[in-house]
Amino acid sequence: SVTYVNFQNLESSYCQFEESEILIGSENGGDFIGQDIINQSNGRAVFNPTEVGSNIDITYTFTNTLSCTDTHTESVDTVYVKPEIILSGLEPAYCELGLSSELSINQTIDNNSEYEIRKNGIFFDSENSLNYEFDPVEPGLYEIINFYEDNNGCLDTLISSTVVNANPNVEVD
């Protein structure tokens, strides 16, 4: 007698490089097969899409003790490309009170982009925008962290660093 199988936790769409929840087969001991499937044994697997695509079949197969086999296939409708943030305008070093820089990222959805600025590891500033004016008013080590989410819900994060060097103290005798 055949043991009928299915599985759970596969979504209809993913972003490139976004792991699925653990896929769980209805019977222990089955195997998942398909593009970008990572079997974890005992009827469990993860879908970790590395390629953009559509209509990607994931199949769960189980053979019972009577050597009867059943399979169940579901499809991922779409794997969307992951956005890749590229930051422009940041210099590797600045002088205290020097000229500011207009930072920008290569994306297009203004309200889905955030700049978070940390100075010496502590929150310093943030702004929701595609652009940010970095003004080197205080010396320190700065991290510029960009978060971006596209229309498909795909995310990218970029961490860039710079330093603002203190101006020398000049004394007149």
Image (cartoon, rainbow, N blue to C red):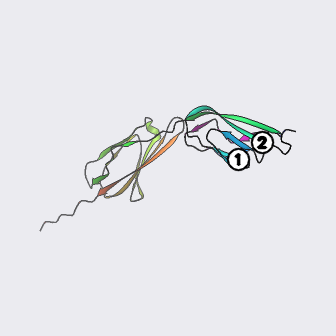
Q: From which residue to which does the magenta span run?
A: 6-19
Q: Is residue 10 visible?
A: no
Badge 2 density bin: few <14, some 14–19, many ≥20, Cα 10 Å: many
Residue 26 at what x, y percent from top left? 77, 43
Residue 113, numbered label: none
Q: Amino acid at mark 1?
A: Arg
**Residue ID for mark 1:** 44
Q: Judging from the image, what secondary structure is the residue with disc 1 in?
A: strand
**Nearer-N-terminus badge (2/1):** 1
Instruction: Specify whether residue 65 is painted magenta.
Output: no
Give the residue at x 32% y 51%. Answer: 92
Residue 96 at what x, y percent from top left? 27, 56
**Residue ID for mark 2:** 62
Residue 68 at what x, y percent from top left? 83, 39
On-image quarter of the C terminus: bottom left
Q: Residue furthest front?
A: 67
Residue 163 at what x, y percent from top left? 33, 55
Left of 8 or right of it: where is 1?
Answer: right
Left of 168 or right of it: where is 18?
Answer: right
Left of 46 or right of it: where is 4?
Answer: right
Question: Could you say which is closer to the camera, residue 80 or residue 94?
Answer: 80
Q: Amino acid at mark 2?
A: Phe
